[in-house]
Image (cartoon, helix red, strand yellow):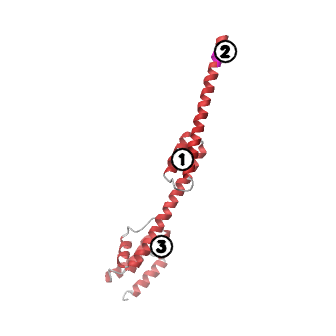
Amino acid sequence: MENEGLIKRIELFLEDENWDKAIDYCERVLDEDPECAKAYLYELLAELKVTTKDELKNCAQPFDDLNSCKKASRFDSSLAEELGNYNEFIRNRNEISHKEQQYETSKHLMYDNSVSSYEKAICGFETIIDWKDSKEKIEECKNKIEELNESAKRLEEERKLREEENRVIKAKK
């Protein structure tokens, strides 16, 4: 491989986290060999500020929309599969994280013990209906809303009864 020295330099730049130099050298390799999947991979690593391919799974967001990823995948089918797996891993991890966050937020709303909080919790659990015990939590919230409504109704009836008693007492005086 005629660009072996440049590739080694890129690897060292990545190791040293010298992202700009790594990208510059990737471009030098690509000027000579525009189909060099490894140079596109290394450019991707530098763009994402990771030193090794294995660190790609730690990226916050999928990176399959980046040109360097598209080109690396285009020129090396096994690399395409590997990069696709990393992106899928990131998407799955982010989805799980989102569901867990929504679950905890909805569960926390239940501590407020108000009709509006229970209604908000239901909405939250409905967005992750198949996550953990969300279905059971929805039923629990509905039951709590019913209890709170019944309690409010009883309190209102008691208030009206006291008012009537007070009116009768005043009328007797």
Circle count: 3
Q: Residue 41 carries which label?
A: none
> Residue farthest to the bottom?
2
Of residues 169 and 47, which is closer to you in this image?
169
Q: Which amino acid does label 2 sit on?
A: Ile
User: What segment carries the magenta color?
Assistant: 165-169
| Horizontal relation, residue 49 to residue 149: left or right | left
Q: Which residue is tagged 3? A: 50
Three-letter amino acid code of the residue under disc 3: Val
Q: Distance between the residues labelled 3 and 1?
A: 39 Å
Q: Mark 1 points at which residue?
A: 121
Q: Sequence order check: which comes first, mark 2 or mark 1?
A: 1
The secondary structure that most of the magenta stretch takes on is helix
Asked whether 120 or 25 is in front, the reply is 120
Position in image of residue 53 (x %, y %): 47, 76
- Report the Cα–Cα distance between label 2 and label 1: 45 Å
**Label 3 secondary element:** loop
In front of the other: label 2 or label 3? 2
The relative height of residue 135 versus residue 62 in the rendered view (above or below) is: above
